[in-house]
Amino acid sequence: MKVLVTGPFGNIGQSTLDELLRQGHQVRCFDIKTKANEKTAKKYDDKIGVVWGDIRKPEDVAKAVEGQDVVIHMCFIIPTTMSITGISSEDKPEWAEAINVGGTKNVVDAMKSMSNRPKLIFSSSTQVFGHTQQENRPRCASDAVCATDHYTDHKLRCEEIIKSSGLDWVILRFTAVLATKVGMNPDMFDEPLDMRMEFIHTKDVGAACAHSVTCDEAVGKILLIGGGRTCQLTYREMVGRGLEAFGVGRLPDKAFTKEPFAQDWADTAESQRMLQYQQRSYADWLEDIKREAGYKRHLARMFRPVARWYLMRKSPYY
């Protein structure tokens, strides 16, 4: 099938591209032209088509959507410094809204104008459920939602635009997605250690997105996409084991916030039955980051006191 991916050159986007190509789809990418995006696109040689443009411009979006069977819409500004733009949705909310909400509306309008309307797959987040740790159970797709920041407000507004569009759509709400290339991000301290948190490997997210392309049963559904029981941990265990794998070791509790954060475990039975994407555990991810880190792991172990001192300086709570 002819599949357009918006925002394809980030963490989840590249995993999705890889799986779409593996399944034999004809893939077109739409993103803004930057040196980083051009460098990533070149890795795929002639395996993909690329339309450069600005999602805030309806004419650019219409050009990208033309002739496609499915659109996987991932272009979104996120609320942390892990964003590929380097800018948080919370620091520049009006700019982020123009891309997130305005861009989604442009995608929907372009698709609605086509005689043969494509199917729309939208990447959302389980963070839209808000603060739920007191409920002591996994989230379900039918649970009430509650925006806690600009990012989740934008996600929910986009979901409403899509649900009322008249298009065939699938909304995928992801739990915490971790890439295999990781750095020491200061945002790691902004989540409480006792919080329930579900991880999913970026490659499993790519599989879920790619399998949604041909899954007719998923149309009109909101599906929760997480790693499953082997990836349901507390944040204490998740970040602690990750730091140990990187050679730094666990950090003291007082370095981390005690304020609530919008994360939780998810009931993924329905999405797994339909999409068959859960292949990797948290232990698999740990092995991946060890391989990816290479010599940096050994340097971290050699200079462990310095690495820990450097990290602790990044914590606003210590």
Image (spheres, rainbow, N blue to C red):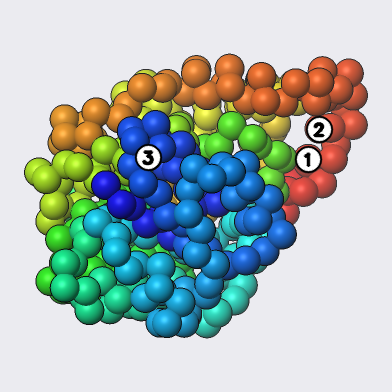
Name the mark nearer the viewer: 2 or 3: 3
Marks 1 & 3, CB-CB < 8 Å contact: no
Instruction: Give the residue number, with chain letter if any, for mark 3.
Output: 20
- Identified at 34% across, 36% down, the residue is 24
Marks 2 & 1, CB-CB < 8 Å contact: yes
Marks 2 & 3, CB-CB < 8 Å contact: no
* Element type where label 2 sits in the image: helix
Residue 103 numbered mark, or none: none
Residue in front for this viewpoint, 154 or 4: 4
Residue 144 visible in this rendered orientation of the protein: no
Instruction: Give the residue number, with chain letter if any, for mark 1.
Output: 311
Drawn side of residue 21 relative to residue 192, left or right: left
Farthest residue in the left direction? 217
Instruction: Give the residue number, with chain letter if any, for mark 2.
Output: 308
Q: Amino acid at mark 1?
A: Leu
Measured in 3D between alpha carbons, the distance from the residue under mark 1 to the one under mark 3, in whole angstroms, is 38 Å
Residue in front for this viewpoint, 137 or 48: 48
Drawn side of residue 107 relative to residue 171, left or right: right
* In this view, 138 is above or below 229: below
* Element type where label 3 sits in the image: helix
Residue 57 picture location, percent across and down: 46, 82
Tell me if mark 3 has few (under 14), some (14-19) or many (20+) residues whose alpha carbon lies within 10 angstroms of its own: many
* Element type where label 1 sits in the image: helix
Q: Amino acid at mark 2?
A: Arg
Residue 6 picture location, percent across and down: 43, 60
Q: Quadrant of residue 20?
A: top left
Measured in 3D between alpha carbons, the distance from the residue under mark 2 to the one under mark 3, in whole angstroms, is 40 Å
